[in-house]
Image (cartoon, grey):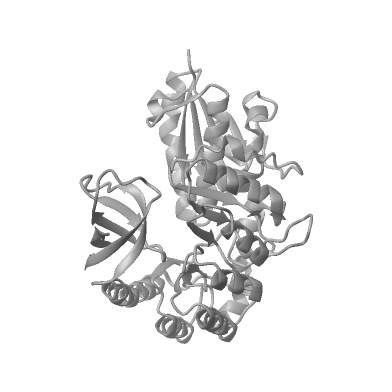
Amino acid sequence: MTKTFFIETWGCQMNDLDSQRLSGSLKLRGYQRVENESAADLILLNTCSIRDKSEQKVFSHLGRLREMKAAREDLRIGVCGCVAQQEGEAILHRAPWVDFVMGPGNVGHIDQILAGERRVAIDFPEDRNYDYLTVDRPSATKAQVTIIEGCNKNCTFCIVPTTRGREVSRPFDDVLREVRAAVDSGRVEIELLGQTVNAYRCPVSGRDFGALLGAVAEVDRVARLRFMTSHPAEVSDSMIAAMRDHENISRYLHLPVQSGSSRVLRRMKRLYTREHYLDTIARIRAAIPEIQFSTDVIVGFPGETEEDFEQTISLMTEVGYGSLFAFKYSPRPGTPALKLGAPVDDDVASERLNRLFDLHEQFKREHLGSYRGRILPVLVEGPSKHDPSMLTGRTDDNVVVNFSGDPSTRPGSMLGVRIEQAQHHTLRGEAVA
């Protein structure tokens, strides 16, 4: 009888790709993926620990699985990802019905884990065993490609250096081989991934992120190239030049600022000031005037005053982000920020977060409204989920467009779409010749 597996994924794009790697490895070994955990012989929870609420969801889910495990002795449950790395053996004490705990560094060693060689695998092996040919990519048009794992930045609020380890870049040529294989399989959009993607440096040749970006953009049939997440302190002239010189590199950049106050940025140990960040934005816009930015913001960080927050508001106004991901500060175990004092009062932090979202709503409406009447190149992803009679795709700056067009259009095609309407998060339009 064929064994089945189910994966629940929380968190970032790196976790998504880890789940794709796990899925591909299991399918290669004869497992069949199912979409309902009650039908699975193996359940993997690929977890995120960037905020406390994400961690709580994991243990709540494990509580629900307890009865399922009691009723089926053959069922195996594995906790993977960043909560696994953070909590380790403590998960087995809290939820003894879990069969194994596996951190992100061991994704390539799932065979050993399933064979029972280790019940807790939270080390960072020198051999990460990254087999890109087994990645089970869910999209017919897009391939995510890890180029660097881990982070050396040690921001005081962040647990990533603990859960993902120190920076390890993949060899330049290995990345290019994976990109070519993805394109050969029909994926025309490539997304390069890393916790600090632009810190990439080839361990063999020393070539930097800008060199890799240009080389990937020049691979035949790469229609669109994206990357995330970039650190402002790692934005180099070579990265900007590569973006400027290759039209297939998306005119969209996610550049987390976290705060508009230099005082708070120093307490966060972000390695840049407000002035440096704005200068970086100006350098990029001077080279690529049409570029759009998105960002991350943390409100309520220990010691954040109203004046600090107002500086975040003013920076938001100055940059004019197309997208915003903002959260209240969430204390994480073992991080230096715990020694900086208590977080801002929760009611105050909530009020600040709402003000930030209200301001961004205004920017977003203006940004999306500016597309009305324009013809934009849209990379077709397939039928719209909400209306199968329409097609869906994304603009160069990562806005979803639902549009009418020839239903036989192949995913991966690049079409001109006349934008007729701006909705809350998306655009609507009609394909043109």
Q: Can you give x and y, in whole percent of width and height, for residue 40 in the image?
A: 44, 25
**Residue 422 seen by the camera:** no
State the image coordinates of residue 342 (x, y, percent, origin top left): 53, 70
User: In this orientation, does residue 85 appear?
Assistant: yes
Residue drawn 60% across the image and 68% down it = 337
In the rendered image, which quarter contains the C terminus?
bottom left
Tell which of 81 and 119 is nearer to you: 81
Taking the image as shown, residue 363 lies to the left or right of residue 155, namely: left
- Residue 140, x across and y down, in percent: 43, 42
Q: Residue at x 53, y 27 (%)?
A: 27
| Extreme-top residue of the structure | 1
Nearer the observer, 294 or 415: 415
Q: State which quadrant residue 152 falls in.
A: bottom right
The answer to whether 112 appears left or right of 371 in the picture is: right
Residue at 69% across, 30% down:
118
Quarter occupied by residue 105: top right
Question: Which residue is depicted at the point 43% across and 76% down?
Answer: 290
Looking at the image, is 33 positioned above or below residue 405? above
In the displayed structure, does residue 20 sit left or right of residue 423? right
Compare residues 245 and 358 and report the one nearer the observer.
Answer: 245
Q: Position of residue 224 (x, y in %)?
A: 48, 58
Name of the residue lying farthest toward the right:
204
| Nearest the eye: 39 or 100 | 39
Q: How many circles with numbers are drawn on the protein? A: 0
Outermost residue to the front? 433
